[in-house]
Image: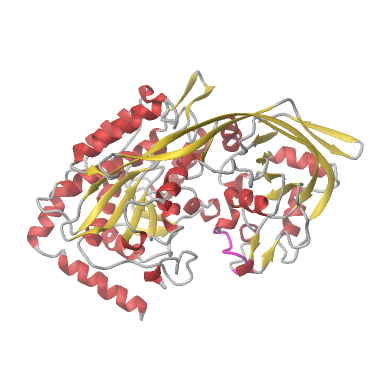
């Protein structure tokens, strides 16, 4: 019955849009989305003068003021009580590991160098964090999931100890759809969850064993992250309820540590995938000394609103984070992390969609919000803050369309939806995709947990249907294998590295034009209806909002 009602609602939307004058207006709006505009925007926001767009730096000031001027240029008004900026109070903690990290196993001493062997930081507002002879405990995947009858801490006491856990969740390694979600990562597989759960269990520290397949990226990513400052929403207790230190072992380090115990990580992982598995004390202790530099300040979310003509309190949000990693470790003589793809292309995508909406003589019935959160790279900090302090009532926030990492590799046949099957938004986007002669597909790498790794997740976590979708997997001209190779090349050679630069000599932005037109038209359909999309049955985000209960 529910599916039938959805189809009726969608049919009504199509009817609304069938008038010739309406179609002409939509066509003219889409024509405002151009390769030339996208090129200008990405070139500017990823220029060296923006200093890598890191929060708490001069690069932030330059970036947010540029964004405000671009949003104003589109015809939107300030989103936050007359301001373009929402202040996000944060604490910046820069951790430095003093000397080697020492693990004692019986008579053997293993000394680890940071960050090459072990990538560690402290979220504590303490200048000196000293952990001595902390007992190490292996806790499987570090998951407590009652709905899956799973508790890796069931027979363990990890209070004041250091927990070592596997990345991802058991479904990935078995492929069993009855075990969690099979190869599709659940939130229980994310590093953020594992840090949170270890803290709830009273652990002093938590270390994740890195594996590229389970994490979705190489060890270089947490390694580099540990070298930069961490940003946290300001916390009244100084994060005293969190672990004293958090971090990752490289795969080689984990093999060395468990090899000294006569075990292999592969065997441990296979055993930990069996329901009822019990972890164990490793018979080891860890010593670590960390110095923290602490700074309290605030960063800014940036946003603009186009007020709806009939129902201005209802809103469709388009989001793309503005931040990146600033100036950091040099590679090939370059130390500015410009983030042209991550997330310059998506910033341009959102601004062009805003311009399309502003082109209409009559505003849409519902409001449109362009939202550029801060500190996404530090754990979705800005969007989490907005979700807790929203401009629009979450009950009246119709949908969030977010984007991240839009690859400039030309037009695609596919529309890849990360989180496919989660909400009714699939149906709306599918209708517009068909008009573009494109097809919907789920993320072919759901084990990487991308649905939990960008700002749409902060909206989903408070019950707002949220989508992360873009052409990514099937090049119209060169096919699937070529597209997959382009993505691998980006992830392996430019993702979170200084090499992520604007390069007009090889970039093809026509696909991003098409993606922007797609999401504009999907949002336009929602903006001129009274319909609220819902989460689908079985989604973990259903029943959070009262309208979905």
Frontmost residue, 481 versus 148: 148
Side of 274 where 52 appears, left or right: left
- Residue at x 85% of width, y 37% of height: 104
Q: Of all residues shown, which one is farthest toward the left?
A: 21
**Is 165 above or below relative to 88?**
below
From the image, which quarter does the N terminus lie in?
Answer: bottom left
Q: Main secondary structure of the magenta part?
A: loop
Frontmost residue, 354 versus 398: 398
| Position in image of residue 384 (x %, y %) | 45, 49
Dividing the picture into quarters, in which one does residue 179 lie?
bottom right
Side of 213 where 162 appears, left or right: right
- Residue at x 32% of width, y 59% of height: 397
**Is 454 above or below relative to 87?**
below
| Position in image of residue 200 (x %, y %) | 66, 54
- Residue at x 39% of width, y 50% of height: 389
Side of 207 where 19 appears, left or right: left
Dividing the picture into quarters, in which one does residue 124 lie?
top right
Q: How is this picture coloured?
A: secondary structure
Q: Of all residues shown, which one is farthest toward the right?
A: 107
| Position in image of residue 292 (x %, y %) | 62, 29
**Is 95 above or below relative to 234?**
above
Any part of residue 185 in sight: no
Dividing the picture into quarters, in which one does residue 131 lie?
top right
Span shown in magenta: 178-185
**Is 332 above or below relative to 486?**
above
Asked if the magenta segment contains residue 43, the reply would be no
Q: Of all residues shown, which one is farthest toward the top?
A: 333
From the image, which quarter does the C terminus lie in?
Answer: bottom left
């Amino acid at each position: 019955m529910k599916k039938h009602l959805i189809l009726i609602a969608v049919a009504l939307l199509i009817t609304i849009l069938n008038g010739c004058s309406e179609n002409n207006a939509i066509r003219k709006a889409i024509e405002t989305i151009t390769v030339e505009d996208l090129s200008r925007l990405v070139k500017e926001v990823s220029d060296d003068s923006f200093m890598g767009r890191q929060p708490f730096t001069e690069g932030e000031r330059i970036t947010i003021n540029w964004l405000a001027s671009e949003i104003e240029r589109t015809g939107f008004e300030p989103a936050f009580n007359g301001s373009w900026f929402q202040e996000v109070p944060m604490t910046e903690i820069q951790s430095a590991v003093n000397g080697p990290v020492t693990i004692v196993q019986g008579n053997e001493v293993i000394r680890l160098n940071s960050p090459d062997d072990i990538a560690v930081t402290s979220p504590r507002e303490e200048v000196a964090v000293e952990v001595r002879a902390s007992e190490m405990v292996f806790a499987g995947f570090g998951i407590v999931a009652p709905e899956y009858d799973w508790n890796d801490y069931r027979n363990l006491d990890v209070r004041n100890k250091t927990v070592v856990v596997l990345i991802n969740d058991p479904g990935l390694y078995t492929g069993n759809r009855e075990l969690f979600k099979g190869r599709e990562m659940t939130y229980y597989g994310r590093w953020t969850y594992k840090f949170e759960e270890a803290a709830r269990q009273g652990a002093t520290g938590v270390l994740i064993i890195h594996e590229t397949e389970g994490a979705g990226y190489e060890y270089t990513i947490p390694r580099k992250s540990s070298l930069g400052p961490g940003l946290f929403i300001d916390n009244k207790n100084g994060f005293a309820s969190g672990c004293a230190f958090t971090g990752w072992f490289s795969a080689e380090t984990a093999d060395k540590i468990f090899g000294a115990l006569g075990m292999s990580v592969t065997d441990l992982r296979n055993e930990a995938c069996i329901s009822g598995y019990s972890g164990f004390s490793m018979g080891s202790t860890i010593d670590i000394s960390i110095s923290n530099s602490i700074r309290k300040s605030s960063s800014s979310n940036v946003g603009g609103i186009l007020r709806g003509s009939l129902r201005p309190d209802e809103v469709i949000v388009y989001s793309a984070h503005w931040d990146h990693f600033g100036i950091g470790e040099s590679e090939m003589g370059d130390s500015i992390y410009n983030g042209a793809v991550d997330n310059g292309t998506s910033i341009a995508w959102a601004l062009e969609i805003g311009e399309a909406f502003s082109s209409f003589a009559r505003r849409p019935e519902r409001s449109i919000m362009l939202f550029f959160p801060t500190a996404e790279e530090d754990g979705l900090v800005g969007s989490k803050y907005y979700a807790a302090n929203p401009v629009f009532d979450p009950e009246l926030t119709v949908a969030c369309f977010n984007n991240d990492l839009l690859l400039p590799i030309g037009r695609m046949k596919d529309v890849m939806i990360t989180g496919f099957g989660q909400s009714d938004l699939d149906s709306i986007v599918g209708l517009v995709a068909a008009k573009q002669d494109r097809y919907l597909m789920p993320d072919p790498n759901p084990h990487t947990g991308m649905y939990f790794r960008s700002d749409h997740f902060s909206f989903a976590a408070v019950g707002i249907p949220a989508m992360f979708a873009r052409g990514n997997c099937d090049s119209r001209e060169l096919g699937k294998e070529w597209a997959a190779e382009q993505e691998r090349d980006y992830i392996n050679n430019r993702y979170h590295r200084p090499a992520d630069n604007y390069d007009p000599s090889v970039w093809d932005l026509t696909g991003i034009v098409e993606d922007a037109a797609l999401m504009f038209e999907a949002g336009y359909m929602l903006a001129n209806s009274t319909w609220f999309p819902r989460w689908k049955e079985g989604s973990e985000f259903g029943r959070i909002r009262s309208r979905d209960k």
